[in-house]
Image (cartoon, rainbow, N blue to C red):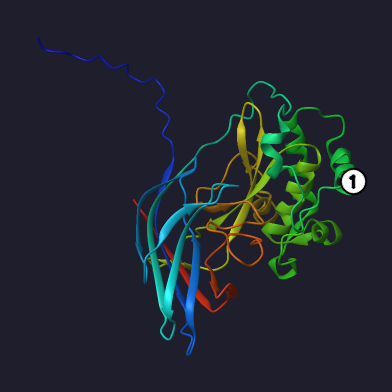
Amino acid sequence: MELTLEREVPTDTTVVPIKRYEIYDRFQIAPLEGIAGRMDVWCPMIPDTPYQRVLDVSIAAPGPYELNREPEFGNLMLHAALLEAFDKALLFEIRYVVERLRVPHRLDSPPVRALAVRGLFARALAPEQYVDVDLKTQALAEQVVGDECSPLERARRIYDYVTEKMTYNAAEQSWKGSTEHALACSVGNCNDIHALFVSLCRSLGIPARFVLGQALEPPPPGQEACELCGYHCWAEFFVPGLGWVPADASCACKYGKHELFGDLEMNHVAWSVGRDIQLQPPQHGGRLLFLAGPYVEIGRNPHAMVERQIRFFESS
């Protein structure tokens, strides 16, 4: 007997936008004459998220390595422990194929409720280095939201306040993503802008966190690839019934793109979540303010002689 499967024909013909990128992350540790021992190398790896899928990845390293996740945020990272004389340069090369997906949140859905179990989100409610959650930020946050009770609308009012108050200027940033700097100067880069957003959300009991990544700007005419400098960050806040919702107040301040409450531009690719990061296995130095790129220790001491180059192609 022949079996026939009847499939329901979908009536929704909406095409979900997708962009595909080929990304090359290359970093080199300079040679160290006369130094031998143990070198530990960590590097963030692009993860799968609701907004991006890693379709392919290849890694070339100068020695054995492992892939780990740290337990607090779940960040994925490469770790290599090298035992040798370091009189030659050590090169790591990682290639990705990443699909970026548009996943806009339905912010016109029924009213969401307040957070019931705060303990599950303790890490996203507490102060961090340079991210204040105190009586000062609480008083300001309450002034900003007024009599609004919905956590979603409270976050929206905070977003509107931050984008109106802050001016984007990377030359006048704090270099550490500081609530205090944002409040005192009303100017900064993406980290300062989102430090203020995260502080005000947390001060009202709305879990919020940083997402660190890159904005893959298109290459100049006639060029096929683009080399990236620096990084870009945005924020996510959590509301029951919606989950983690993105908010990019920095692009609103810099470019006047105010539709990025609940959405992200399609050229944003995330590398890591959170601040004050303890690596896996744990580093001997202090927690990293951000997990933005390679971190190296030699004999338990941080080593800064690392050159990194990130290039990408947009593919069909």
> Is residue 2 positioned above or below 168 on the image?
above
Which residue was labeled with disc 1? 135
Quadrant of the drawing holding the N terminus? top left
Q: Position of residue 297 (x, y in %)?
A: 55, 72
Residue type at mark 1: give it: Leu
In this image, 244 relative to 114: left or right?
left
Q: Count up the numbered dots.
A: 1
Residue closest to the eye, 80 or 215: 80
Q: Quadrant of residue 149?
A: top right
Q: Is residue 5 above or below residue 217?
A: above
Residue 159 position in % (x across, y down)? 73, 43
Q: Give whichever of 115, 17 is nearer the camera.
A: 115
Across and down, in percent, residue 202 comes to 76, 42
On screen, residue 63 versus residue 244, left or right, reads left
Does 186 sit above or below residue 7?
A: below
Asked whether, in this view, residue 18 is left or right of residue 179, the answer is left
Q: Is residue 63 above or below residue 72?
A: below
Seen from the viewer's position, the closer of residues 51 and 308 is: 308
Q: Residues within 10 Å of mark 1 (few under 14, many from 20)?
A: few
Which residue shows up at 84% across the image and 56% down it? 183
Q: Splitting the image into 4 quarters, where does residue 63 fall? A: bottom left
User: Residue 145 occupies which quadrant of the picture?
Assistant: top right
Which residue is found at the position 75% from the left and 58% from the top? 129
Q: Residue furthest bottom?
A: 34
As helix, strand or loop, the secondary structure at mark 1 comes to helix
Looking at the image, which residue sits at the far left? 1
